[in-house]
Amino acid sequence: MESIFVAEDIVAGYEDVEIVHNVSVEVAGGEIVAIIGPNGSGKSTLVKSLLGFARLFHGQVLYDGRNITGITPDRAVTLGINYVPQINNVFVNLTVAENLELGAYTRKDGNIKADMAEVYRLFPELAARKKAWAGNLSGGERQMLAIARAMMTNPKVLLLDEPLASLAPKAISPIFKKVKRIRDNGTAVVIVEQNVKRALEISHRCYVLVDGRCVLEGDSKSILSDEDAKQRFLGLKA
Amino acid sequence: MGVNWAQVLFNSAVTGSLYLIAAVGLTLTYGLSGFPNFAYAEFMTLGAYMGYFVVRQLGFDVYFAFIAAFLACGILGALAYRGVFRFLANRGANKIHLMVGSIALGFVIRYIIGDIWGWPATTFGIRWPGFDIGPLRVTDLWLALIFTALVLAVIMHLLLTRTKTGKAIRGISSNPELALASGINIERVTLVTWAGGAALAGIAGLFWGAIASLSPLLGWAMILPVFAVTILGGIGSFYGVLAAAFIIGLAENIGVVALTQLGLSTEYRMAIAFIILIVTLILRPQGLAKAFRRT
């Protein structure tokens, strides 16, 4: 499979501190790739640095064969790369519908209405609450709105930063179902996740980060059945 | 002595209208840029002096003064943002530096105005004769002020809820990082808001100059109640400011009645906004905004 989004030899962090050391990640259209690892391993920093939300010290970012290293977040959106932050990922004092409208902010075509209807079909939970303040949604609904907002630009690459963090267990599988539907439409999905088991179940391939270095990468199914790797890197009991 | 309560309410509407026009830009730019712009006082002063310039020095009709104040202050606001605040922020200035910078900018503008037009208080030289509507004593100017505030409230509501830029203003104010992740051009939206807000400050200053008198300290004298309105309303919240402007307008006018009845000087009127400001900061520092949710 041809990778649409490639990050090579990334060194990233904040201000003068390097948190991520020489990590390479790539994802193809219609593929879900998981970046997993313990708290503070640099997963989020890695993803943020690719779009200009964190400092990129070294490395190269390619999108659709183009070098987009050092891109700003707003430019990334117009190219078709969308990012959903882990926290504060909705506009709390805007309504659900207004959140989606701002998601489409960069678009100038006339199909926004049609795409909004499409997003509501994918997220019927939100369609029922169009006029509700985003700040009044439940945790699961909020996460859905965050992903739905990102979908308003029809991104070719979707980066999700810990979409399951702080969600009730019963809210998790509906979110995963949506992510799979998005993948089925051909979008490349990168999912940063602490919930290792869930992440391995949903993804095709995964990268395991420890202390800012990639200690393991490969096919998620085989890692899930590799008891040694699970114990050593993921802290999962056999 | 009997109190004409209808008149007190009317006066409150006049005061509230002035505060509304004055505070809209301050609260929105505070919400977007994250620091209180004290030079806002001088945006108001410049608006008043544009009125003086057009009416007294050029001899034009007062209507042209509104256009001049709107344009001059709008340009000043855009220049202040681009030339001073964004410039400083790009060089690593934090919110405190920017606030202190705004005080400095205010001084510079104030002294330039003082140098050009002189320091003694003056007027536009226009008389606004009072006339009676029922129990109310009114002037055309007061009615124009209330009408302007009403139109502004409607336009702002439509702008913030119906237009892309308005929703972007609320979005940036609510969550700047997500606004960036949504591809919103924060720079452009912020610049437009600074220009529009400063233009409104100019209109407020012009009204105040016409109602009372003007001096280079006009804005400085008005900035305290305008900040009280901004903070009571909840920083960044237009709907909060809409409510707070009339609450403080009412409190001041009832206060004036009370001071008169007690035989105290109405000079203490200034203290009323100050007291409300302090009480708000103690009891409800987030202001009224949460009651409205919207920006």
Image: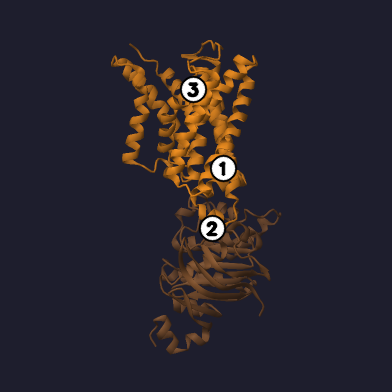
Amino acid type, callout 2: Ala
Q: Which residue is mark 1?
A: B160
Position of residue B175 measured from the top left corner of the image (x, y, whole percent): 49, 52
Q: From the viewer's perspective, is B17 left or right of A100?
A: left
Q: Residue at x 50, y 74 (%)?
A: A35
In primary-sequence order, the first of circles 3 and 1 is 1
What distance separates the C-alpha of mark 2 from that of mark 3?
55 Å
Q: Which of pointers 3 and 1 indicates the residue nearer the eye?
A: 3
Chain A display color = brown
Chain of the residue that carries numbered disc 2 in the rendered image:
A
Position of residue B266 measured from the top left corner of the image (x, y, whole percent): 35, 17
Amino acid type, callout 3: Pro
Q: Which residue is mark 3?
A: B216
Circle 3: element type: loop
Name the quarter where the N terminus of chain B is drawn. Answer: top left
Q: Which residue is mark 2?
A: A128
Chain of the residue that carries numbered disc 3 in the rendered image:
B
Q: Which chain is orange?
A: B
Amino acid type, callout 1: Leu
